[in-house]
Amino acid sequence: MKKKWIALAAVVIVAAGAAALPVGQRFAASRIKAEIERDGTATVETVEVGLLDRRVTLINLKTHAFGEVVVHRAQVSGLSVPFSDLLEGRTPLSDFRPGDPLRAERLEVTEARVVDPATGASLAVDALTVEGLDLVRYDGAVTGPYRLAILMARIASALSVRRIEEKKVVYTVAVSGDTVELEKLSIDRVDRGKIGAIAIDGVDATPKNANEASFKIAEVNAKDIGLGRMLPRLSDASWVLGRPLGRLEIGSFRVAGFGGVLLSQYGVSLGAISLETNRQSVDSVASHLRIEGLGVRPGSNAEAARLGVLLGALGLRELALGFDCSGEERRAKRELGITDCRLTIADLADVSLAAGLVNADDAFWRALDDGNPLGIGGSSIALGSARLSIVDKGVIERSVRALAAATRQLPSAARAKLAQDIRSYQPPDVLITEDLTKLLDTAARFIEQGGTLQVDARPDPPLGLAALGRLSSPGPDLVSLLGLSATLSR
């Protein structure tokens, strides 16, 4: 009998709790709504609260906290707040201000728009989903024309997120009204300035009032992004547009599927651009840049028409190019190396460049890390060696035929005349030496025979920035100054 009374009491308690739950949720919602609208900077049409899953939903929210913000619907669940505080309407959303912390398992936003009143720039998002949100307290006191940019940088420095997904993001540029639209954006493993991966589908840049995008990208993928150098600078209250932001660290990225009116007007097609970096040690980083599927054919404007004439003279309908470049930073050895940069031009030539820069001091690396190219001028970086190779794949024969047609000569006569002009060439304001004559003779034999022309530079001592003035001094001995030599092979 006693067990029956206990069971009955439990049922009554549960039923009472269930009956009271809607009342408690409505009470909490009213408190949250009142708190949001308390100081007159924000309004919200409807607030809904789910006590069991610590969920708060805001309908038609308008606020001036982050500029002019309008949100059709925002829902946050799994809020990290005590149940008693939630019941009383005390949540981070009740009186949320820039700088406040926020922890939640999930945030969903639909139809949001933010306008920067200082510049007129705006950002609109159709749908936003955030999972595993952890925003620690940060300094939200920012004033001035760049308030929104500085505030976003401070938020990024304080934010950790498991995943962010946005759909149809439209950024409207201040003054011009041009737009940049992202169809879908996904960001994974955000940790206070470090990002595990970014994926973007569909990027369109469109001028105001235009019917077609001037520039398009099908997809962007990046991994292991580090904003550690950039965010502290951008978070500084004194930051202004144009100030160096620092170097962006990135493990890899690939941008593919280029298009748009701008490229088509110039007859340009581009498949993909990719970069990979490999940190081999604390002081050594290797990088590899590729450009794939680059083509140029006559387009619709005047410049493209002139290109068409040139290609026609060479017997080509289009230029098909590829670019592959490897380099390495060796800070402990004070070196920066261009291992091999290769440009392939189908049916014309392969061109490759390798170079070694030495005496890379702290001033050079500091300028590189700070994103301040002007700072390189005060460094001791110098050219230690360089090698340029040109492999004839038809460029000489096609060029000679074009020259012969333009000058109404036989190709053999045009080739001989061009080679002779190179041999007898005397650069103005340059010391004419026997070594320079030999170098020009090698270049002339390349015109006559084809093959592979290789030009090496080994300045001794290495040529630093301070010594560049000697190149423009009257009558410099360029061959000796740069340590130039040339060879020709079949």
Image (cartoon, rainbow, N blue to C red):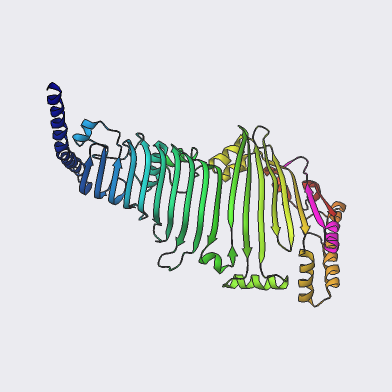
Residue at 15% x, 35% y is 15
Whole-percent x, y for residue 110 in the image: 32, 51
Q: Which residue is drawn at 57% across and 37% down?
A: 366
Residue 440 visible in the picture: yes
Looking at the figure, which quarter contains the C terminus? bottom right
Q: For this rendering, which residue is in front, 78 or 464?
A: 78
Viewer-nearest residue: 354 or 132: 132
Lateral position of residue 237 relative to residue 355, left or right: left
Q: How many marks?
A: 0
Which quadrant of the rendered structure holds the N terminus? top left
In the foreground, 416 or 430: 416
Taking the spot 79% from the left edge, 51% from the top edge, the residue there is: 455
One can see residue 236 in this view: no
Residue 165 lies within the magenta run = no
**Residue 182, image quadrant:** bottom left
Q: Hey, which residue is sitting farthest front in the picture?
A: 1
Residue 366 to residue 213: above or below? above
User: In the figure, is residue 280 to the left or right of 152?
Assistant: right
Judged from this view, the residue extending furthest toward the bottom is 408
- The stretch in magenta equals 440-463
- Relative image position of residue 233 (x, y in whole percent): 46, 40
Q: Is residue 325 left or right of residue 64?
A: right
Who's the residue at 59% across and 58% down the image?
A: 271
Q: In which quarter of the image is residue 87?
A: top left
**Where is 389 relative to 406, above or below?**
above
**Where in the figure is residue 453, as x and y percent of width and height?**
80, 55
Q: Does the magenta stretch include residue 460?
A: yes
Question: In this picture, is 363 found above or below 5?
Answer: below
Residue 475 picture location, percent across and down? 78, 53
Q: In this view, does 111 lie to the left or right of 197?
A: left
